[in-house]
Image: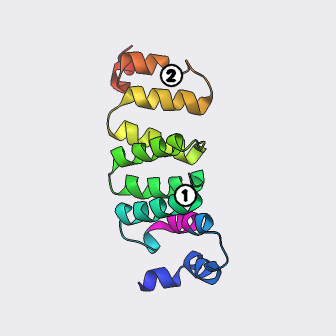
Amino acid sequence: APKAKASPLVRSLTRNWLTLPPEELVENALVIGRSLFDTFDDGFELLEAAEHVAGGALSARAYGGLMRIGEAEGRHADVLALLGRMRACGAPPGPAVMLAAMHAAASLGDWGCVSRLFSEYAGDDGAAAPLEVLGEPAAVEEL
């Protein structure tokens, strides 16, 4: 695609594609995102292959890039599944991953999940307990 070839990020990646380790190559491709592939499914196939080569999880940046694509496509459950996939591999999620997961949970209306993710992100087990107990933001506003 002409758009992809014009992108400075794509040109940089093209210059370095033979020298970068596979997991860094995939991380950069997922961060660049839609300039290189068309759908979340294409990105997921790339992620899966790179995990296999790396023998485990990739960087939080790689998952975050794919999560942004998933959010853009409205694939909120798949975004949350990526967080679970990272955790299953023992990889710590970064701030961008946590924020994407909170956005996905909110889009699904799962305020308990948003609460738990926020508490984890904030480093406080009970910081968002009222939201989890009361439910949706409208219920909290009524109080």
Is 138 left or right of 58, judged from the image as shown?
left
Q: Which residue is mark 1?
A: 62
Which residue: 58% across, 51% down? 60
Foreground tag (1 vs 2): 1
Which label's residue is closer to the chain start, 1 or 2?
A: 1
Label 1 crowd bin: few (<14), some (14–19), many (20+), radius 10 Å: many
Q: Position of residue 84 (x, y in %)?
A: 46, 41
Residue range of the region highlighted in magenta in the rendering: 26-33
Residue drawn at (60%, 54%) of the image = 59
Q: Amino acid at mark 2?
A: Ala
Specify few, some or many for label 2: CA neighbours under 10 Å numbering under 14, 14-19, or 20 or more. some
| Residue at the right extreme of this rendering | 19
Tag 2's secondary structure? loop
Task: In the rendered structure, find residue 128 and report the number of the disc placed on it.
Answer: 2
The foreground one among 28 and 2 is 28
> Quick check: 110 above or below 77?
above
Q: Callout 1, which amino acid?
A: Ala
Q: Secondary structure at mark 1?
A: helix
Determine if the magenta segment contains residue 29: yes
